[in-house]
Amino acid sequence: MAISDLIDQTVKDISGLDQAAMTAARARQDQLTKPPGSLGRLEELSIRLAGIFGEATPRISKKTVVLVAGDHGVVAEGISAYPQDVTPAMVMNFLGGGAAINVLAGHAGAEIVVIDAGVAADLPDHPQLRPVKIGRGTDNIAVGPAMSREQAIQCLEVGIETAREQIAAGVDLLACGDMGIGNTTPSSAIASVITGAAPDITTGRGTGLDDAGLAHKAEVVQRSIDTNKPDAKNGLDVLIKVGGFEIGVLAGVYLGAAAGNRAVVVDGFISGAAALIAHAIAPDAAHSFIASHQSVEPGHRISLSHMGLEPLLDLGMRLGEGSGAALCMPIIEAAALCLSDMTTFAEAGVSEKIEDDEEASS
């Protein structure tokens, strides 16, 4: 079904991994000065990067974390341990450079793009803030759809345009980060709808709910699904019914990155839910997704598994903001560098492995 000219063309531009580039990368890996396979998952990752970029020796220079904020009407159901005014306060913290993502992105040498997709407060002008404001928070998904079709399309288009802009500016590696009190509830609903897992499995403690709060949250997720009946096969419908403004924009970033043949790093649970939306809209987009870490949130593993993704790290993190994705950026960059910058046995004049005993005795 057609969505919009921009989204439809973006989906059309998404293809699978470049097999010729991967074959060339694999052949080079086998000739590098190391025992075959000795760099483990770094080797697999470098070959995957070759397929994403369509280049036998891809290089990563510029890196950007796209950090999108939005509020959620479902907080009216008492599903968060923190009040909604934390969202604008944290956005200002990002802009002031004091959050974990600022530290980790700085360590990775990555820029941060901060987008207000739907914070339920007026934020002051700031040179690093992009005020999109699709709405002042979504509607309460426990009683009706999160947003209109028009708003959902706007979310995706903002994300696609952001990815296109970053790629045009020379960015090779993007990461998706989020901020929004209450956003693990729609993420749990998205994960349940698309993967088929029950809400009591996909729902976690978020910012720190106790057992009673967790049970109530799972019930709200189930009620949201029952009330809205989203179509699991239709990513746009899932976004409209149980999504979030920041989740929709991030889904667009995933689509735009995949269409532009660039890698995009999946952070935690909310970033993963956005990836599920993008995957439902264009399954081939997942070829460009790199899972950074395994979140403590139980629905995250289910979401990644549904897309065939295996996280690089498991550090017990559950912050969001793109923190795990930024942490993995240097690892991804290192994988590409080993492929491109290590010498081959022939270049180094190093003897390769002796193939068999007969050859060894000759």
Image (spheres, rainbow, N blue to C red):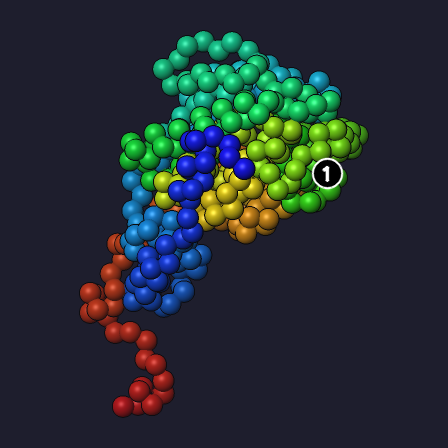
Pick the front one: 331 or 192: 192
Q: Can residue 103 be seen in this view?
A: no
Q: Where is residue 204 in the image (x, y as percent from the top left)?
A: 68, 36
Residue 12, by quadrant, is: top left
Crowding around mark 1 (Cα neighbors within 10 Å: few <14, some 14 to 19, many 20+) is: many
Q: At 33% across and 35% down in the image, what residue appears?
A: 167
Q: Quadrant of the N terminus?
A: top right
Q: At 48% across and 48% down in the image, what residue appears?
A: 284
Which residue is the extreme one toward the front?
1
Residue occupied by mark 1: 199
Residue 268, by quadrant, is: top right
Pick the front one: 312 or 124: 124
Residue 359, by quadrant, is: bottom left
Q: At 37% across and 67% down in the image, what residue appears?
A: 36
Q: In the drawing, does residue 246 fall left or right of residue 55? A: right
Q: Can residue 342 be seen in this view?
A: yes
Q: At 59% across and 31% down in the image, what residue appears?
A: 239
Q: Position of residue 42 (x, y in %)?
A: 41, 55
Q: Quadrant of the C terminus?
A: bottom left
